[in-house]
Amino acid sequence: MANREIECLADGLRKHVKALTLDIGPRTPFLGDSLARAAAYIQSIFEDARLCVTEQAYQYYGQRVINVIGTPPATTGASAYYVVGAHYDTVPTTPGADDNASSVAVMLELARRLPETKLKAPVLFAAFTLEEPPAFMTAGEGDEPFNLATWCDDNFPS
């Protein structure tokens, strides 16, 4: 990577971490619309990267929460995927810079740069919610409802 590319990547990573940690702040189902705002931010970056975006919604204590899924447009009928995932919620009292805004930032920058790359299989980007307590290790945890085979069947019916 050339120095200019590295600088652009670093700027993009900082921008995403700032948006999630400072502009939105702690992201939990107990702090107003923080999860919805984070999901909307992620969705906008996926859309800017020309990914097809779907939501995997489910209920957590009467609140609608979502996993945000982004895929390249030409993936209909793919038999295999690379999956890149990160969770976007935080522990209620922290802005979550290292857990997990930094991983979300890497996923978003990869989503911005990867669609033009030829790979053996398409990449599915999954932004999970509710990976932190109190949902951690429960049926409410964001990756629990996500199942790649089911998601493909629901989104690419044969």
Image (cartoon, rainbow, N blue to C red):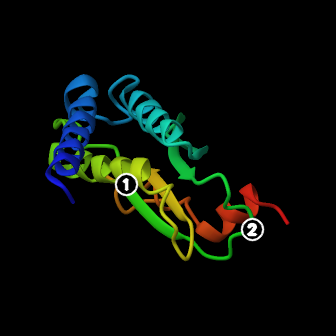
Q: Nearer the viewer, residue 139 or 3?
A: 3
Q: Quadrant of the C terminus?
A: bottom right
- The quadrant where residue 53 appears: top right
Q: Position of residue 2 (x, y in %)?
A: 19, 55
Q: Nearer the viewer, residue 37 or 48?
A: 48
Residue at horizontal 23 percent and vertical 37 percent from the top: 92
Q: Nearer the viewer, residue 86 or 119?
A: 119
Q: Is residue 17 left or right of residue 48?
A: left
Disc 2 is placed on an element classified as loop
**Which numbered dot is residue 69?**
none
Would residue 51 be seen by someone viewing this image from the given angle?
yes
Choose top left, top right, bottom left or bottom right for residue 77: bottom right
The picture places residue 61, in percent across and down from the top left corner, at 49, 39
Q: Residues within 10 Å of mark 2 (few under 14, many from 20)?
A: few
Q: Is residue 116 above or below residue 147?
A: above
Q: Is residue 121 above or below residue 135?
A: below
Rendering coords of residue 118 (x, y %): 52, 67
Per the rendering, the mark at residue 110 is 1
| Residue carrying label 2 | 77
Residue shown at 34%/45% (left/top)?
Answer: 88
